[in-house]
Image: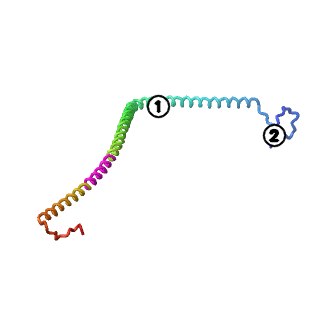
Amino acid sequence: MTQLLLVPWNPAAVQADTVVFVPAAAQLEMWAQVSTVVIAILLAVLVVLTIGAMVQMRRLVILSNRLMADARKHVLPVATRAQTAADNVTYMTAVLREDLERVHGSVASLTARLNQASDRVEERIEEFNALLEVVQSEAEGLFIDTASTVRAVREGARALSQPHAVSQDPDPEET
């Protein structure tokens, strides 16, 4: 690694085989002026470019403001209509929800009534079946009583018409 030592300039301390370059003060002054001019030119160019960029930015801002104003003119009616449509949809949804709740309540009530009516009809059918069984039983009993009474009258009439004769027909029920 090379080290740079700053030593005060002493011409007597320099050996004969060492070359030391000391620029003249005039040359240093000239280079300082040239660099100052170059920096000034670069700064001027930078200022001009910055001003140009700012002018372009200003134009873009003005143009974007115009576009935003135009867009606002066109979008505002659409947004208003969209808001109105959204309000209508919200209202219709609320109305439909209320109607569906009423229909659901009605269906639930109707279902309960139908179940109750079905239970009642089932009870009545069972009662009617029991009544039919009683009627059938009574009818059978009446039929049997009537048949036996008719048979008894017939046998009595036969016995009266043939007082001493014994019936030659054996009773089919007696055997």
SS at badge 2: loop
Residue 139 coordinates in the image, percent (x, y): 23, 55
- Neighbours of disc 1 within 10 Å: few (<14), some (14-19), many (20+): few
Q: Is residue 28 left or right of residue 83?
A: right
Image: magenta residue range: 119-136
Identity, as a three-letter code, of the amino acid under mark 1: Ser
| Residue at image coords 54%, 31% | 53
Q: Earlier in the sequence, mark 2 or mark 1?
A: 2
What kind of secondary structure does the magenta stretch mostly adopt?
helix
Q: Which residue appears farthest toward the bottom when viewing the image?
A: 168
Identity, as a three-letter code, of the amino acid under mark 2: Gln
Q: Is residue 165 above or below residue 8?
A: below
Q: Is residue 134 above or below residue 3?
A: below
The residue carrying mark 2 is: 3
Q: Nearer the viewer, residue 64 or 36?
A: 64
Can you tell which quarter of the image residue 98 is in? top left
Q: Quadrant of the C terminus?
A: bottom left
In magenta segment, residue 130: yes
In magenta segment, residue 155: no
